[in-house]
């Protein structure tokens, strides 16, 4: 059993991450670097320091406590030199308002299960369970597999929210312990993949085909992030439809409209590259819904 896993957060009473009332466990680390990522604090496989300036009271305690001199006073708050910061947690420990927060904590399998078991009553009454999200849960395969096995022993329903970006052997190890897959399809053109995602994602499509051949289509929900001018282009939609049409027994398809996440990137001291991009309008989403549904699929926005 994997001793420890790096977890960004454990959210209780989640109602949008699968059927029923769920607890969502956010794994830290992802092989992709999507500029529209809704959880950028989960991308790095190391701990991150996040700064919520609206909570800052400019007391200066964190500046005095930082062993790396990575903090300095700036205006009504502080400025973080992320090139010096080692995420040692000292500033977050002494901050009286929670303006500085470390994203990423080590958990044992037992510690995660203890949190999940607090909500067993909700799972049972709502046909809910646990969703493993991120980041990319497959990026910590041993820890994920150990948790999945424990959930199976405890008869806790599991959802794996994944892009499938992992070696085939990893998917083969975990797939039989997953009750429902939330499978994120992104870009189909290789040049677009490298440009926006940071790497090619052929293993994502290969693992989806693996699930299909194993008869897991009825246990798979395809999720497509609608990013105006990027994922909703005619070329990408044509590629996605080609992939979807090759799958058997798909449960349904979810369209996830882009939301502005620049504040999250800024709080992590990271550059945000999609400035000026707006959320898709309702009529645009409905057009995509109708176009994909015409292929015989059940589509939700």
Image (spheres, grey):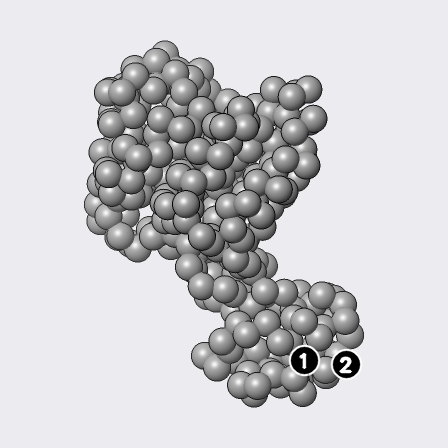
Looking at the image, residue 268 lies above or below residue 167: below
Say which residue appears at 57% left-offset and 78% top-offset: 80
- Please give the residue where the numbered disc 1 appears in the rendered image: 62
Looking at the image, residue 190 lies above or below residue 130: below
- C-alpha distance separating marks 2 and 1: 8 Å
For residue 115, which quarter of the picture? top right
**Where is residue 227 shown, x and y percent of the image?**
43, 42
Residue 238 visible in the current orientation: no
Residue 24 visible in the current orientation: yes
Say which residue appears at 47% left-offset and 61% top-offset: 272
Discs 2, 1 touching: Cβ within 8 Å: yes
- Please give the residue where the numbered disc 2 appears in the rendered image: 59
Asked if residue 128 lies left or right of residue 254, the reply is right
Question: Of residues 19 and 192, which is closer to you in this image?
Answer: 19
For residue 101, which quarter of the picture? bottom right
Asked if residue 96 lies left or right of residue 41, the reply is right
* Mark 2 residue element: loop
Crowding at mark 2 (Cα within 10 Å: few <14, some 14-19, many 20+): some
* Mark 1 residue element: helix
**Where is residue 174 shown, x and y percent of the image?**
35, 34
The nearer-to-camera label among 2 and 1 is: 1
Asked if residue 201 lies left or right of residue 270, the reply is left
**Where is residue 65 shown, x and y percent of the image?**
65, 84
């Amino acid at each position: 059993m994997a001793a420890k896993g790096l977890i960004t957060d454990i959210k209780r009473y989640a109602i949008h991450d699968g059927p029923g009332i769920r607890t969502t466990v956010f794994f830290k680390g992802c092989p992709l670097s999507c500029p529209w990522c809704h959880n950028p604090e989960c991308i790095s496989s190391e701990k991150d320091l996040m700064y919520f300036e609206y909570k800052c009271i400019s007391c200066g305690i964190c500046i005095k406590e930082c062993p790396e001199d990575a903090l300095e006073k700036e205006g009504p708050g502080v400025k973080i030199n992320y090139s010096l910061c080692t995420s040692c947690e000292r500033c977050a420990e002494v901050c009286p308002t929670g303006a500085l927060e470390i994203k990423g904590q080590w958990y044992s399998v037992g510690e995660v299960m203890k949190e999940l078991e607090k909500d067993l009553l909700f799972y049972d009454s709502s046909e809910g369970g646990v969703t493993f999200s991120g980041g990319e849960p497959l990026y910590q395969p041993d820890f994920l597999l150990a948790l999945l096995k424990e959930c199976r022993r405890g008869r806790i329903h599991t959802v794996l929210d994944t892009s499938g970006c992992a070696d085939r052997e990893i998917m083969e190890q975990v797939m039989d312990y997953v009750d429902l897959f939330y499978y994120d399809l992104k870009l189909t053109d290789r040049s677009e993949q490298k440009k926006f995602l940071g790497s090619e994602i052929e293993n994502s499509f290969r693992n989806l085909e693996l699930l299909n051949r194993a008869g897991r289509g009825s246990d798979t929900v395809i999720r497509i992030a609608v990013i105006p001018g990027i994922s909703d282009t005619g070329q990408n939609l044509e590629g996605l439809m080609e992939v979807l049409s090759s799958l058997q027994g798909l449960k349904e398809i979810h369209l996830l409209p882009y939301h502005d996440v620049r504040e999250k990137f800024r709080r992590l001291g990271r550059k945000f590259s999609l400035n000026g991009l707006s959320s898709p309008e309702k009529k645009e989403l409905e057009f995509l819904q109708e176009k994909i549904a015409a292929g015989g699929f059940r589509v939700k926005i």
